[in-house]
Image (tube, rainbow, N blue to C red):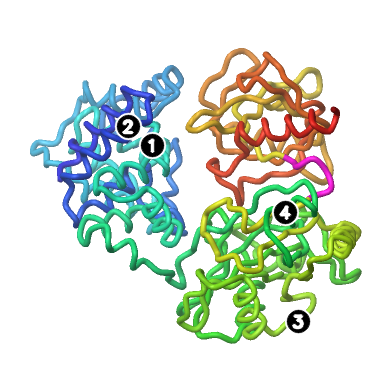
């Protein structure tokens, strides 16, 4: 397939904001894509070249792309940079300059989808001497074989800035429509494979019955099962039945440990962090006795002297760390708490009840306090015992309790009533930063006020501004560090205010939620405060929704009445 065919789809998608129209555009296109190409086409529609969980990164800076555009178009670096500042989009810069390029290859080749994805994938392979030149040559080869519109989307894909409004939910719906499949079955297949490219390939080559045969594969992550919020033990018993399993809800980060040949560690956001956590690999290798497995757990910062847990912020910096790994292991040790297993010794456990999965987990795990343990639990039908367990968890410095139906299966990637969570305070919200403002006086050089948004379908709705909780200096996130995080994400500047790509997700505490016409959501957080970063482990798809905001608001009103 020629790449221009996919580009025409991008252009059609840009013309509409309506989800159903976008679904139709993609579905109609996929019907005519071959089985050998459909996986790559899905990746490119998503704006990626690797599966979501793949640890390989394209690793191209905007500055290097700027040089390639200059070289391919014949325009000076200064001219390219000037146009970049005017448009704020290097893809559009490439599109404009390729239209009047001064140097053309004598024999322009037809550019195929296969060639585009092959060249972009190769960008992740180079290290050491000569890397920059090799990368420039690969991109130049694509740009010199492309028309202006192709150039734009090649650059956008390389920079991971494809903005045609395609979400994973849209891909799901389009696949269901293209192949007359049930949407829930398509989503289930994705939650087990975490790869819509693979799902599309199966549908194209083997039809909808192939989805029924999809199973877990150790070494490949599974979408984590998620919990809905409960406001009391009584509510949880009513929803889940009795007896129910209560577990400590820890202030760490969710990890999935998967072993086929090697042990891999993934975050709940499917990021491969195996290299960052050699201690987890070691603990599991020494103490989990199974030839293959997929485990679910929580890594918690651990003080070896006091034998107590520390706040999440203590180890959050380890997630993105790429160097001095073993120094970080010594400085910020963890204890791994396992609470579930969905695959063990060739046996798929995803449809087994919780109590059976826990029994298997206990059978394969040797507990070593300070390294690897099973999450503390209580199975009870007694409300007083449950409340006492909840209070014990809070007194131990934990967030609260997880509450689970003892017969619940593991429903990958879904918020279902099989699992609930109970905390002692108003549930903090995970929100994304969409705007920021430079401060006054000594804070003038820093972004110091941040507009935060929740999700409503494919839209982001503002719910307030936060500045409290971030520090000028000392421990914790500083204004300087936040400014460094946001500057590369700036899309537009207007005096002191900047609009940023919605990438940085933060956990926000607040006193209450109020109705407000000041923000696009119609609500405002009262006294919002920054608690911690969440984007190392949470994606944009997982931030709180407008429905969550409305539920908390209505709950507040009910308590006041």
Nearest the eye: 445 or 56 = 56
Sequence-first tag of 2 and 3:
2
Image check: 315 left or right of 184? right
Q: For the point 45% across and 82% down, which residue is it?
A: 346
Q: Which mark is residue 238?
A: 4
Sequence-first tag of 2 and 1:
2
Q: Is residue 366 above or below residue 256?
A: below
Q: Which mark is residue 166?
A: 1
Q: For the point 70% across and 70% down, which residue is it?
A: 336
The part of the chain drawn in magenta is 423-428
User: What is the C-alpha distance between the residues marked 4 and 1?
Assistant: 39 Å
Report x, y in % for residue 202. Answer: 27, 60
User: Marks 1 and 2: in contact by CB < 8 Å?
Assistant: yes
Residue 489 is drawn in which quadrant? top right
Sequence-first tag of 4 and 1:
1
Can I make out residue 418 in this image?
A: yes
Under tag 3, what secondary structure?
A: loop
Q: For the point 62% across and 13% down, which residue is it?
A: 495
Under tag 1, what secondary structure?
A: loop
Under tag 4, what secondary structure?
A: helix
* Residue to which mark 3 is pinned: 368
**Disc nearest the viewer among 4 and 1:** 4
User: Marks 1 and 3: in contact by CB < 8 Å?
Assistant: no
Quadrant of the rendering where the C terminus is positioned: top right
The residue furthest left is 107
User: What is the C-alpha distance between the residues marked 2 and 1?
Assistant: 8 Å
Nearest the eye: 39 or 95 = 39
**Disc nearest the viewer among 2 and 1:** 2
Sequence-first tag of 4 and 3:
4
């Amino acid at each position: 397939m020629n790449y221009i065919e996919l580009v025409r789809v991008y252009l059609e998608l840009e013309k509409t904001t309506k989800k159903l129209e976008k679904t139709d555009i993609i579905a109609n296109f996929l019907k005519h894509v071959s089985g050998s190409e459909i996986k790559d086409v899905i990746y490119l529609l998503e704006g990626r070249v690797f599966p979501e969980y793949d640890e390989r990164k394209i690793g191209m800076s905007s500055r290097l792309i700027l040089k390639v555009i200059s070289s391919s178009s014949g325009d000076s670096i200064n001219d390219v940079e000037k146009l970049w500042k005017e448009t704020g989009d290097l893809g559009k810069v490439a599109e404009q300059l390729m239209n009047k390029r001064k140097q053309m290859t004598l024999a322009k080749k037809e550019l195929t989808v296969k060639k585009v994805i092959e060249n972009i994938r190769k960008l992740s392979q180079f290290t050491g001497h000569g890397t920059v030149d090799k990368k420039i040559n690969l991109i130049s080869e694509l740009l010199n074989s492309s028309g202006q519109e192709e150039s734009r989307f090649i650059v956008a894909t390389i920079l991971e800035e494809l903005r045609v409004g395609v979400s994973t939910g849209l891909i799901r719906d389009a696949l269901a429509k293209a192949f007359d499949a049930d949407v829930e079955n398509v989503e289930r297949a994705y939650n087990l494979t975490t790869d819509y490219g693979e799902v599309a390939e199966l549908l194209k080559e083997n039809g909808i019955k192939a989805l029924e045969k999809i199973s877990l594969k150790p070494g490949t992550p599974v979408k984590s099962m998620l919990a809905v919020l409960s406001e009391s033990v009584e509510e949880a018993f009513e929803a889940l039945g009795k007896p129910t399993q209560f577990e400590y809800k820890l202030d760490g980060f969710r990890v999935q440990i998967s072993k086929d040949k090697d042990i891999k560690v993934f975050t709940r956001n499917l990021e491969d962090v195996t290299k960052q956590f050699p201690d987890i690999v070691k603990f599991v290798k020494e103490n989990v006795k199974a030839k293959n497995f997929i485990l679910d757990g929580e890594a918690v910062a651990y003080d070896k002297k006091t034998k107590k847990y520390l706040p999440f912020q203590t180890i959050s910096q380890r997630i993105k760390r790429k160097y001095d790994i073993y120094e970080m292991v010594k400085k910020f040790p963890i204890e791994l708490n396992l609470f579930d297993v969905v695959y063990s010794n060739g046996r798929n456990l995803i449809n087994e009840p919780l109590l059976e999965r826990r029994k298997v987990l206990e059978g394969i795990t040797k507990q070593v306090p300070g390294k690897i343990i099973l999450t503390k639990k209580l199975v009870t039908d007694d409300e007083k015992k449950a409340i006492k367990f909840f209070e014990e968890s809070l007194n131990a410095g934990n967030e609260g309790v997880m509450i689970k139906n003892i017969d619940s299966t593991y429903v990958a990637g879904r918020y279902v009533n099989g699992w609930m969570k109970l905390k002692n305070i108003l549930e903090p919200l995970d929100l994304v930063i969409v705007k920021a403002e430079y401060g006054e006086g000594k804070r003038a050089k820093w972004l110091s006020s941040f507009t935060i948004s929740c999700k409503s379908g494919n839209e982001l709705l503002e719910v307030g501004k936060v500045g409290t909780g971030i520090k000028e200096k000392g421990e914790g996130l500083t204004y300087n560090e936040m400014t460094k995080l946001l500057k590369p994400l700036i899309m537009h500047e207007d005096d002191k205010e900047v609009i940023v790509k919605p990438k940085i997700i933060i956990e926000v505490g607040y006193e209450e939620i109020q109705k407000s016409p000041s923000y696009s959501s119609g609500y405002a957080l009262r006294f919002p405060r920054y608690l911690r970063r969440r984007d190392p482990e949470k994606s944009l798809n997982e931030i709180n929704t407008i429905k969550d905001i409305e539920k908390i608001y209505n709950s507040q009103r009910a308590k006041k009445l």
